[in-house]
Amino acid sequence: MEPPLALLAELTHRCPLQCPYCSNPVRLSGASGELTTAEWQEVLTQAAAIGTLQVHFSGGEPTARQDLPHLVRHAVTVGLYTNLITSAVLLDQKRVDVLAEAGLDHVQISFQDIDDVNGDIVAGMAGAQKRKRDAAAMIRRAGLPLTVNLVVHRQNLGNLAAMIEMAAGLGAARIEVAHVQYYGWALANRDALLPSRAQLDRATEEVETARARLAGAVVIDYVVPDYYAKLPKSCMGGWGRRFLTVTPAGLVLPCHAAESLPGFDFPSVRTGSLADAWQASDAFNRFRGTDWMPAPCSGCDRRELDWGGCRCQAFALTGDAAATDPACGLSPDHALLDLAVQDARAEPPPFIYRRIGALPVG
Ligand code: SF4
Ligand code: FES
């Protein structure tokens, strides 16, 4: 068994933003159950010991943890490449400089739109868009490489060309154009977020134009959203193959959305080791490899390319986490995506904002 490539360290579910497409679970953890600084340091030590190469500090908003510089420094000490995935709205130059001095290797900031009004509406926070722009400049001043993550959906896709220009102007060396993935809170807001086919086609053309214009200066990552794809994505590079996630409360998950799946008893770093979780737990072995696959995946020559797609999407759409991902055109459930796409033509409903203590239904 290969060691994991990367650890996603979800330091906290706390976040000043309320994005309706958040991939965090709909039942968010409060601050009282979070791992302590010493517990996170032990997680980082164990991750490095089992051969993990990278740690991505995420959340929620990871900068809500005041001990973030200590955790970055510890990760660097044990030999991990460190990336901070942040909304950036809590950063100032001093905090950025402290993180750079601690050895942080890279920062990724997500943007909700091009203009302050729409950006703040999607983020659910007044002034968020301006703070993000300011923070991007601070990060570049500190000499840290920057990736800008543009989260796109039906309510901002028309601004994509301008959003890419903005990201390049902020000094990003990499731009990720990320269509919303429908797990967690995003699934509850799917009808408000899912773009039309015409929107998607226009966006794809704009990405190609921008790629040509920015070639050699900026790399643009772009993946067609599942709901319009003919083949599923290789989610997480395959279950239990490349990534592990540790939640704010210390659960070890094969993917960030796995808590949405029923029938799992996920291991915890509070009661066991990361090595055991990775190598021996039922949670990581349940969908590892190809033995678990049903038809048509079991006989398909793409089964070791996309690993049957996404388990969380399969469960969200079919109620069966072991089903072929309906994003696959060969799935018997593929028509479910067509139905969702038809719904997307209707007037979008209002957003259901993400908040600790709130639930999208009931
Ligand atoms: Fe991938 Fe399964 Fe579809 Fe084949 S049938 S392309 S393995 S999801
Ligand atoms: Fe969980 Fe794809 S998001 S397997």
Image (spheres, rainbow, N blue to C red):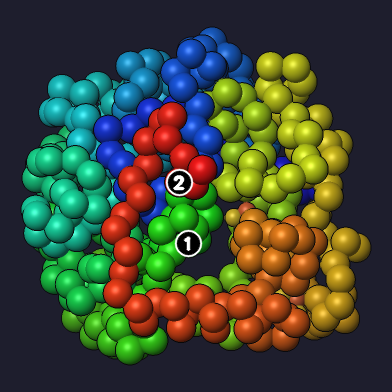
Q: Say above or below: 357 vs 306.
A: above
Between 92 and 104, the one nearer to me in the picture: 92
State whether residue 232 is above or below residue 290.
below
Give whichever of 346, 279 is nearer the camera: 346
Q: Where is residue 217 in the image (x, y as percent from the top left)?
A: 22, 68
Taking depth in this image into account, of 216 and 56 the one nearest to the observer is 56
Mark 2: secondary structure: loop
Residue 238 placement: quadrant? bottom right
Count of marks overlaid on the render: 2
The residue wearing badge 1 is 181
* Quadrant of the image occupied by residue 156: bottom left
Q: Is residue 130 above or below residue 330?
A: above
Marks 2 and 1 sit apart, C-alpha to C-alpha, by: 17 Å
Residue occupying the point 86% across, 77% down: 295
Q: Residue at x 35, y 78 (%)?
A: 346
Which residue is most to the right? 291
Report whether 327 appears left or right of 13: right
| Residue named by callout 2 | 360
Q: Residue furthest front?
A: 362
**Which quadrant contains ligand 1?**
bottom right
On the image, the x and y values in percent for residue 172 come to: 23, 56
Residue located at (50% from left, 27% from top): 29
Task: State the image coordinates of residue 340 (x, y, percent, origin top left).
Answer: 50, 76
Q: Earlier in the sequence, mark 2 or mark 1?
A: 1
Taking the image as drawn, is residue 338 in sight? yes
**Above-or-below relation of 326 to 12:** below
- Residue 146 visible in rendering: no
Q: What residue type is labelled 2?
A: Pro
Mark 1 CB near ligand 2 (8 Å cut): yes
**For discs 2 and 1, the disc positioned in front in the rendered view:** 2
Residue for point 40% across, 68% down: 191
